[in-house]
Amino acid sequence: MGNVVPLQAGNKIAGIIPTSIEEVFRLATAVSKSGLAPRGMETPEKLTVAIMHGLEIGLPPMQAIQRIAVVNGRPTVWGDALPALLLARGFHIGERIEGAGDDRVAFCKVVRPDGSMIERGFSVVDAKKAGLWSKPGPWQQYPERMLQMRARGFACRDGAADVLSGLYITEEIEEERPMRDMTPPKEVVTPVMGKALPPVVGEATAAPTETDEARKAIKEAGSVEVLDHLREAFPDANWPALAADVEARKVELREAQ
C-alpha cells in the first residue's frame, strides 16, 4: 500500500496562480469543462485570454473569469471591479452625485498613491448629447447608476491608466452594441405543391424573445454575480416570470461550491 499524505488542518487557503501559458490553458480547460464559465466565454481559448488579461491588471484567475467580459470582441472589466483594483494598489476613490433632475452630475475622484488627484464628471446633459438618456434599458431603469459608471470609467482610465492597461468598463462598451438583427426569413413550403415560395417582403421568422435569451443566460451563468448583472444585460425580459429560474440557478451554484 502506497504512502498516504495526511491532511493538514488550519493552513491558509491560497488561490492558484499559473506561471506559464500551459498552466493558464490547463486551468481554462478545467473551467470550460465544468460548465461554470460565464456566458460567451465557454471555450478554453476565450477563458485563457480573460485569465491573461486579469493577470496583467492584478486579478487572480477565478476573479478574472468573473470580472472580465468580452463585448464586441473586446475584453472589458465590470465597473464594480474598478474600486477593488485601485484600492489594492494604494489608490483612493471618491464618488458623488450633485444636482437634481436634468441638472444631475456624477463625479468620480481618483487619488493616486503619490497624492495627485484626477476628477471626472458625467452629467445628464452629457448623456443626452451622447444619445444615451432616452435609450431603453439601464439608462431608463438606473439613470444615476449609469451616470456613476460613466464618470468612474473616465476617471479611472485617466487617473489609473497604469492599472487598467487600457481596459474599458463593460457597462460603457455594452451601450455601443448594435441592436439585435432580425432572423432572416426562411423559405415557405406549400403543403400541396411542395414548392418553395420566396420570403414575404418585410416578414421575418419569429426570433427568440429577450425573455428566452435571458432564460438561457440564467442557465449558463457561472456565478451569482453574473446572475445579478443579467437584469442589466436583458432589461426588456419578463423578470417576474424568470424569478423561479434565477432562484433555481442560485441553488445549483451554491451546491456546486
Image (cartoon, helix red, strand yellow):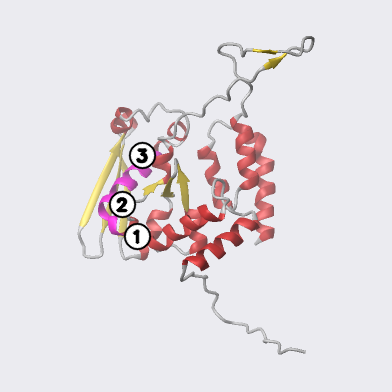
Height in image: 215 above or below 186?
below
Q: In the rendered structure, which amino acid carries the disc numbered 3?
A: Leu
Q: Residues within 10 Å of mark 2 (few under 14, many from 20)?
A: many
* Residue at the spot 31% in from the left edge and 52% down from the top edge: 156
Residue 230: x and y in percent read 55, 42
Q: Is residue 168 above or below residue 132?
A: below
Can residue 147 be found in the magenta stretch? yes
Residue 173 appears anywhere in the view: yes
Corner quadrant of residue 131: top left
The vertical placement of 139 against 201, above or below, is below
Mark 1 = which residue? Answer: 86
In the picture as drawn, the residue positioned furthest to the right comes out as 192
The residue carrying mark 3 is 147
Residue 10's spot in the image, x, y percent? 59, 82
- CA separation in Å, label 2 and label 3: 14 Å
For the residues carrying marks 1 and 3, which lies nearer the camera in this image? Answer: 1
Magenta stretch, main secondary structure, is: helix
> Closer to the N terminus: mark 2 or mark 3?
3
Q: Is residue 24 left or right of residue 110?
A: right
Mark 1 or mark 3, which has the lower sequence index? 1
Q: Quadrant of the N terminus?
A: bottom right
Residue at 51%, 67% in the rendered image = 22
State the extent of the magenta-drawn residues as a range.
146-162
Whether residues under marks 2 and 1 lie with C-beta atoms below 8 angstroms apart, the answer is yes
Q: Nearer the viewer, residue 197 or 52?
A: 197
Residue under label 2 = 156
Q: Position of residue 173 (x, y in %)?
A: 40, 40
Q: Are marks 2 and 3 in contact (CB under 8 Å)?
A: no
Question: Which secondary structure lies at badge 3?
Answer: helix
Q: CA distance from mark 2 to mark 1?
A: 8 Å
Q: Which mark is residue 233?
A: none
